[in-house]
Each structure stands twice: as structure tokens, then as C-alpha cells.
Amino acid sequence: MSCLFCRIVAGEIPATKVYEDDTVIAFRDLHPQAPLHVLVVPKVHVSTLNDLEGQHDALVGVMVRRAAEIAKEHGYTERGYRTVFNCNGDAGQTVFHIHLHVLAGRGLAWPPG
Ligand code: 5GP
Ligand code: ZN
């Protein structure tokens, strides 16, 4: 298995988990860009947003709702936070297994760089 996030899902590579159920796993980013930087990752492999199909609609909803729940658990509901899916080169996607970034704990510039 060559996909990094599939290997984390399988427990072959360690990660600092903040949440796990049958559908998704969430863990701390190795190179955090904010005081809270968590990745919400589906257990099923989907390479990019371009590969999503109708069968994944509920999964994406689960990921987004989980991101909001993680922000809430860390106290950022009112202050605010950012969620990001990067897709392919111009967006800077480096791991080709979809993941939702959850960033919080500092002012985040807009538009992004
Ligand atoms: P992307 O750039 O694809 O949107 O995000 C990939 C993220 O995965 C990056 O923020 C990067 O720091 C993180 N990352 C890369 N390798 C690892 C790893 O082995 N463990 C963890 N926890 N995060 C990783
Ligand atoms: Zn994968």
C-alpha cells in the first residue's frame, strides 16, 4: 500500500489522532500551520475532489460536520476557524487521498496565498 493516508488509516504509520470512527479518522498535521491544524480523512481512498462520485456525498457531509465538531471541542466555534480541501497542483495538494484541513487559533489571511 503506497498511499500515505491509507497507511495511517491502517495503523502502519503513527499519527496523533483526535477522532476515529468507522468512516473517518482525524489527526494532527505533521507540519501545523496554526495552533490547531487537524486533517479529517476518510477511511476509503479517494485521490482528489475530482474523483468524488454520488456515492461519496454522505461521506463528504460526515467530514465537514466532523471538522465543525473538532473545532467545537477545541473551543473555536465562536472565534472561528478555516476548513480547506486542496485539489491538485495549483492548490498545493501533496497527499493524493482527500482530506479536510481544520485550521484555528490565529487570524487567517484572506485571500489565501
Ligand atoms: P495537502 O497539501 O495535500 O492539502 O495536505 C497534506 C498535509 O499532510 C500537509 O499539511 C502535510 O503537512 C501533512 N502531512 C504530510 N505527511 C504527513 C504525515 O506523515 N503525518 C501527518 N500527520 N501529516 C502529514
Ligand atoms: Zn489512500
Image: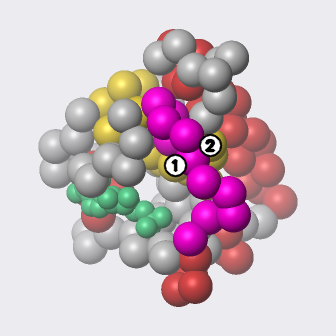
Determine whether 30 is above or below 36 in the image: below
Residue at the limit of the structure toward the right, as seen here: 54
Q: Is mark 2 within 8 Å of ligand 1?
A: no
Q: Is mark 1 within 8 Å of ligand 1?
A: yes
Q: Which mark is residue 80?
A: none
SS class, disc 1: strand
Residue at 53%, 86% in the rendered image: 89
| Residue at which label 1 appears | 101
Report the quarter where the N terminus lies.
Answer: bottom left
Q: Disc 2 vs disc 1: Cβ atoms closer than 8 Å? A: yes
Q: Amino acid at mark 2?
A: Arg
Secondary structure mostly seen in the magenta stretch: loop
Range shown magenta: 103-113
Residue 112 located within the stretch drawn in magenta: yes
Where residue 24 sits: x, y (%)? Answer: 50, 38
Residue in front for this viewpoint, 34 or 67: 34
Residue in front for this viewpoint, 92 or 10: 92
Q: Quadrant of residue 90?
A: bottom right
| Residue at which label 2 appears | 82
Residue at 27%, 53% in the rendered image: 31
If you read the primary sequence from the N terminus, does the residue marked by circle 2 or circle 1 appear first? 2
Residue in front for this viewpoint, 92 or 105: 105
| Observer able to see residue 111 | yes
Where residue 57 sits: x, y (%)? Answer: 79, 50
Q: Is residue 106 left or right of residue 15?
A: right
Residue at 67%, 69% in the rendered image: 49
| Cα gap from disc 2 to disc 1, whole angstroms | 8 Å
